[in-house]
Each structure stands twice: as structure tokens, then as C-alpha cells.
Image: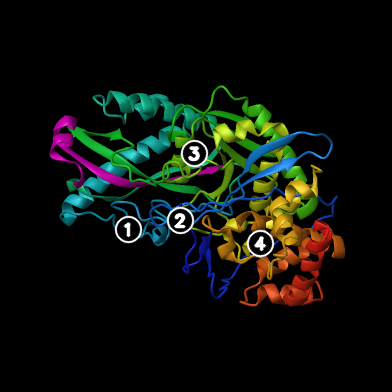
Amino acid sequence: MTPLTGAGEQRGAEVIDEQNGVRPAADGLPEQGSPSEQTTIQIPAQHAAADGPKRPPTFEALGTWTLAHGTLVRRIALGVAISVVAVGGYVGLQKLADAPAEPGAPGNTAQPETSSTPDEGVRRAAVGQAVLQKMADAVLNESRGSFLSTVDPDAKAFDEQARTIYTNLGKLPLATFRLRYVSDDPATLTPDRQAQLGGTESWLAQVEVSWQLTGYDTKPARETLPVTFVTRDGTTYAASFSERFVAGQRRPIWALGGIEVAKGTRSLVISLDSQKDADDYASVADRAVDSVSKVWGKNWKQQAVVYLPAKQTEMESVLGAQPNTYTQIAAVTMAELDSPQVGAPVRIVANPKLFEELGKQGRRIVLTHETTHVASTATASPVPLWLAEGFADYVAFTAVSVQDESAAKELFKAVRAGKVPKTLPPPEAFAASSADLPQAYESGWLACRLISEREGQSKLVKFYRAVHASKSPTGLSDAFRTVLGTTEAEFTADWQKYLKRLAGV
């Protein structure tokens, strides 16, 4: 686990500098919809930051909540990650983000990168791409025999995996599926491995895989797979999709094991756990989408894609996370693209054990929170963390009424001890090592609730949108002035009084 440093937190297409508040340009947001009932509670939060090769930190929360309509008290892990966006940098892969997305794309004049002579590299690339193209065509044409004919007949373990992958891809509503040869390094395979493969030649290549889900994605998801090729008896085959994986490298969920797919009215659930009823989760996700639309408005895609791994290690593989990074995290929002871009496919990834322990109501809260990040494009937004997380908590509790005393336990404890926050929580307050982490999330939620109570829910949404859409480093202060008719200093003073009143001080 790695806390934030002065480098800032990268979310999607921008970097928010913790010290200077740099705000890059953001995409515009849709018009707001009708307001709905306001929420009354937020979960006291703990936060964890994940590390990995060339990855931005990630934010989550762990908290306790009490149902107001009963006496049940639960410990739940609420994932409130802004984003988990892989940024490339895999072995043998250079400048992949800048390369065209598919063969034959306009302007695609660059040759695949190789580590040997140009002629050998071009030959390997041509042969390898031919195998990949046959695979991709077989998937789109639903030709199982053609797909399996590309698999090395001597690679028994890979043959089984390839059959599973083909079946999985057939269950997905694919609009596109492409495999693109990017680079290779023949020296990567050890002599022992080459001897094991046999044939006249074998090598490892980095391959870009892209796929787009019909009705859910506006851009293809992209990841990188290491593909091992072997030539025997004059024919080249694929012999592995997992050779020399780098720790922290993401893997497509459909390459990890057999999947089950459930399609809700507004959701798609892809599950690696055959024991779970994916249809039930789709129903909860549908309700989450509806809850978000009641607050945020309906002018967004109103679709959510949820991944349900069967094991935490599968969750880590999907996210490209180090082992045990998400032990206490229930769910994470991820942009499924190697190069962060606005419009990248966004997935909600659940931690199987913790997510199941939440119960139906807890899962609804988690999915609503994460879906808020999807709707508000939080993976590519310059909004400060207190606003992003506070707003997501605000929306998540539109359907659940719980007691303030339970939700803001740590913050109220501090206020009653005379430690009223001097400012709205800064980015560093959300670092894993921060002692004030629970208060940071509680503070953000109560700040958003104060805006809603004073100005109305629609004004809270307008304020969020204004900050998100701003292309100025002063976007936050500008929104305070133009939308709320106040300054950040004046609002902070009012918020401090609000905290004291709620805490009974």
C-alpha cells in the first residue's frame, strides 16, 4: 500500500497535483435531471492506496453503518475508488498508447517493434498477425473450429484455456474484437522454454487485445497480452496467453476462467463464480443505476458493467494490482484501458468475499456509490476528492436512511474533542497512511449534504458539474462563487458550524 506523494493522484486523463491543484481540461457534462430525496448518512471511511508498476494510487473506504429502520449494525467494506487506470509500460511494449487501435487504421504506418534484424522482425510480425487475425475472425464469425486450429496442438494446457476463452467471448455482447501484434523479443524465452516448445522457431510477442461491448461501451476496452508463438511443420500457432506475465499487469476477465453473464435492464454482470446468481446482482445494479439517475439526471449512458471475480486473486488480476492490495475493499471502479482517455470503458469490480458479506442492502449501497463514479466520469475528472467521494456517498444513500451518529462517528468524536477540521479535507487526507482518513470521507459527505440542505439537491449537482467541466485551475473557487454565491472560506466556516451542530457541540 502506498500513500499519495507530491506527484499527485492520476485519475483518468488528468493529474491532480496535491500541492498546486493543477486542473487539466475536462469533458463537458450533460444537463442535470430532476432532484430526488436527499440522504441522511454516510459511512465512516478508511482509505487505502494501491501501488503497482506505473500505476496511479487508488482510493477505497471501509466503514460501519446502522440501518435507521432497525437495530442491525454491520461492518462493511465500501469500495469508493475513483479509478484504477492502467497506464502501460509492460515488458516488450513501448508507446502502445500512441499506436493506432487496429490494423489498417488511418495513419498506421509504424512497423511493430522487434529486438532483432528488421527483416526477421517483419517476418515474425506478419506470421504472428496472421494467426491473431484468424483468431479474431473466428470469434466474430462464431467459428470454434477455426479458432482452435490456431492453437498449438502440443500445448495441452493452453488448448483447455483457449476453449474456455472462446466460450467466454461467445457469451459477451461483442461489437468488436481485435488482436494486434505490437512488439516481440525472441530473447525473452529461455533456452529451456524454447526446447520445451520445440518446433523450428518460438518467440514471445506483446499483443494488444481490444473489445467493445454492444450497448455499453463507446470506445473499445484495451489490454495487453503476452502471446507465445511456435512454428512447427511449417505452421505457426499460439502456444500461450500468459507467458512471463509482469506483476501488476492487468488481464481480461474472460481470460481468467469460465464466466457467466447476466443482462439486466441497465446493467451487465460478468461473473467468474458459477455459484453466484449473476441475475440477482444484475437486479441490484439496475436499481443502482436508477438511484444515480434520480440525482444525477438521465442524460448519461445509464448502464453499468459489473465484474464478479470468484477469488480475490482474480480481482487483483483484473485490476492489475499487487497481491492482497484489496483485502479490505468491497468494490473498485476501473477504467479498462491501458492509456487513460475520456470515454474509456468503466467497470465496477467486486471483491468476492467482502461483497457477498455485505448483504443485499450493503451491496446496493456499494453499487450505487460506484455507479455514481461511472455516471459522473470520475475516472477522468478534476474534481477534488472530498467532492467526488462526498457526492458519491450522498447519492449512494438516497435509498437508505441511517443514523448520523453511526455514519459520522469518527468525525463527531473529533469535533466533540475540540478538533473541528480547519479546512475541507485535502487530497493527502485520503492517503492510506493518514490518521484522519475516516474523517476525510465523513467530512466530504457532510459538505455535500450541507450544500443540498441549503441550496437544494439540483444545486449540488450543478456545483459538481461546474467543477468537473472547468478548464481553469480556479474551477473550484469559481463554482463556489457562480453556483453557490459564496466563497470556499465562507462555505468552510458554515460547514464547521454545521459539524458542531450535528455533533451537539
Q: Residue at x 38, y 51 (%)?
A: 103
Q: Where in the figure is residue 77, as x and y percent of width and height?
A: 61, 41
Q: Where in the figure is residue 203, as x and y percent of width and height?
A: 21, 42
| Cβ–Cβ under 8 Å for marks 1 and 4 | no
Give the label, 2 or 3, closer to the camera. 2
Q: Which residues are magenta?
A: 188-213
Q: Residue at x 86, y 64 (%)?
A: 454
Residue 315 marker: 3
Mark 4 element type = helix
Answer left or right for 486 relative to 148. Answer: right
Residue 39 marker: none
Cα distance between the residues tagged 1 and 4 = 35 Å
Give the label, 3 or 4, closer to the camera. 4
Q: Residue 439 sits in which quadrant? A: bottom right
Give the label, 2 or 1, closer to the camera. 2
Q: How would you rate the neighbour count of disc 4 (Cα within 10 Å): few for under 14, some for 14-19, many for 20 or more?
A: many
Q: Magenta stretch: residue 502 in it?
A: no
Q: Magenta stretch: residue 189 in it?
A: yes
- Residue type marked 3: Met
Mark 1 element type = loop
Residue 94 marker: 1
Mark 2 element type = loop
Cα distance between the residues tagged 2 and 1 = 26 Å
Residue that carries the numbered disc 4 in the rendered image: 386
Instruction: In the rendered view, tell whether residue 5 sits above or below residue 226.
Output: below
Cα distance between the residues tagged 2 and 3 = 19 Å
The first of marks 3 and 4 along the sequence is: 3
The first of marks 2 and 3 along the sequence is: 2
Residue that carries the numbered disc 2 in the rendered image: 2
Q: Quadrant of the C terminus?
A: bottom right
